[in-house]
Amino acid sequence: MCEEKRRGGKEKEKGFTLLELIIAISILTVGLLAVGSMQTGAIVANSRAYQITESTNAAQVQLEELIRKPWGSTDLSVGAHSPVSVGRYSVSWNVSTVAGLPNTLLITVTAQWTEKGVARSTVLTVARTNLM
């Protein structure tokens, strides 16, 4: 009986049909496109996080320099101060007095940059007192 199947009998062949193969490739393609889209989003988010971290670092460095300055320094005079270029960031600061708290200054440091034509900024604020 085995010989009949080998010689002239039709035996069902095992394997994938062309339609099954096309469906499998289509499903795989959709999955790979989703992963590619997710990867692109992750790269954009990572770039934005890097820029925010760098601008925060630039603002923090300027803020620490202002905190270390002596109380009568011109950099601590009340008002807006001219921006300083730190890499691709423009860092400026504003000093104001705090109502009701003598010998206390409010220092606000802003790091600004442009990303794809859009102005972005990071702002840090600290209160500094003069303890005599």
Image (cartoon, rainbow, N blue to C red):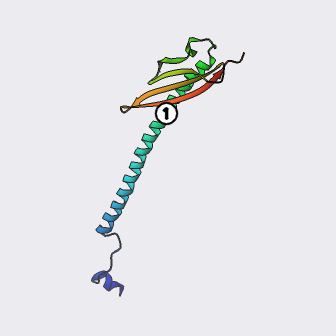
Q: Nearer the viewer, residue 35 or 7?
A: 35
Q: Identify the image quadrant of residue 23.
A: bottom left
Residue at x 65%, y 24% (from the top left corner): 100
Residue extending farthest to the bottom is 1
Q: Quadrant of the N terminus?
A: bottom left
State the residue at coordinates (29%, 67%): 18
Q: Nearer the viewer, residue 126 or 86?
A: 126
Q: Position of residue 126 (x, y in %)?
A: 60, 26
Taking 29 as reference, is 16 above or below it?
A: below
Count of number-bearing discs = 1
Question: Where residue 129 sits in the image (x, y, percent)?
Answer: 66, 21
| Residue at screen point 54% across, 28% down | 57
Residue 97, compared with residue 37, is above or below; it is: above
10 Å neighbourhood of mark 1: few (<14), some, or many (≥20)? some
Question: Which amino acid does the dot numbered 1 rest on?
Answer: Ile
Q: Quadrant of the C terminus?
A: top right
Q: Secondary structure at mark 1?
A: helix
Residue 59 location in percent, x, y?
Answer: 53, 25
Question: Please, which residue is most extreme toward the front here?
Answer: 100
Q: Is residue 27 above or below residue 47?
A: below
Q: Position of residue 116 (x, y in %)?
A: 36, 33
Q: Quadrant of residue 108?
A: top right
Identity of the residue drawn at 45% across and 44% down: 42
| Residue found farthest to the left | 8
**Nearer-the-camera pick, 77 or 99:** 99
Residue linked to disc 1: 52
Query: Which one is in front, 36 or 23?
Result: 36
